[in-house]
Image: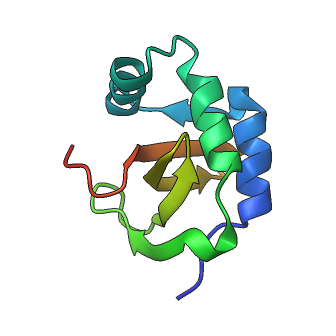
């Protein structure tokens, strides 16, 4: 299986932070573990650290049938291995929606 989204395009959207959305769970996780106020910048750097070899799988979202999310596992960042799940909404303006960003194997 191959990723549904181009990793370089994903990183470009992450760097443009205004084109990236994060859920409350991600914000809480990063703030509580790292004391970071600018969670968007932290997650942008996390996404930009993803390597193509970190790709784990692509899966269809249960809540949004027909939309696929890419999952990267074992992403090395801030001395931890991370699990990152996202999709790109290309209806009009391109938006990167990050659904999960947590330590790999961490139950959340």
Residue nearest the observer in this picture, 56 or 21: 56
Q: Position of residue 82 (x, y in %)?
A: 45, 52
Q: Which quadrant of the rendered structure holds the C terminus?
A: top left
Residue under the image location 46 percent in, 74 percent down: 58
Query: Is the residue 91 above or below the residue 14 in the image?
Result: below
Please state the horizontal and vertical placement of residue 90, each as a whole percent of the image.
67, 52
Residue 58 visible in this rendered orientation of the protein: yes
Residue 70 appears at what percent x and percent y? 51, 65
Q: Could you tell whether 71 is left or right of 108 in the image? A: right
17 with respect to 87 (left or right):
right
Counting from the top left corner in percent of width and height, residue 100 is at 40, 46
Pick out the residue farthest to the top: 37
Q: Between residues 25 and 97, which one lies in front from this camera angle?
A: 25
Q: Is residue 106 left or right of residue 59?
A: left
What residue lies at 40% left-to-right and 19% top-to-bottom? 31
User: Residue 46's quadrant in the figure?
Assistant: top right
Residue farthest along the bottom direction in this orientation: 1
**Residue at 74% of width from left, 50% of height from top?**
11
Q: Is residue 41 above or below residue 14?
A: above
Q: Residue pushed farthest front?
A: 79
Is there any visible trace of residue 92 in the rendered image?
Answer: no
Residue at (64, 58) in percent of width and height: 50
């Amino acid at each position: 299986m191959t990723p549904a989204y181009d990793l370089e395009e994903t990183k470009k959207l992450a760097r443009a932070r205004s084109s990236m959305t994060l859920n409350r769970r991600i914000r809480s996780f990063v703030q509580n573990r790292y004391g970071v106020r600018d969670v968007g910048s932290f997650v942008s750097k996390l996404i930009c650290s993803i390597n193509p070899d970190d790709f784990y799988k692509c899966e269809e979202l249960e809540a949004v049938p027909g939309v696929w999310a890419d999952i990267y596992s074992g992403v090395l960042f801030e001395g931890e291995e991370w699990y990152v799940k996202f999709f790109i909404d290309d209806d009009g303006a391109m938006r990167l929606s990050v659904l999960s960003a947590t330590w790999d194997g961490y139950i959340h």
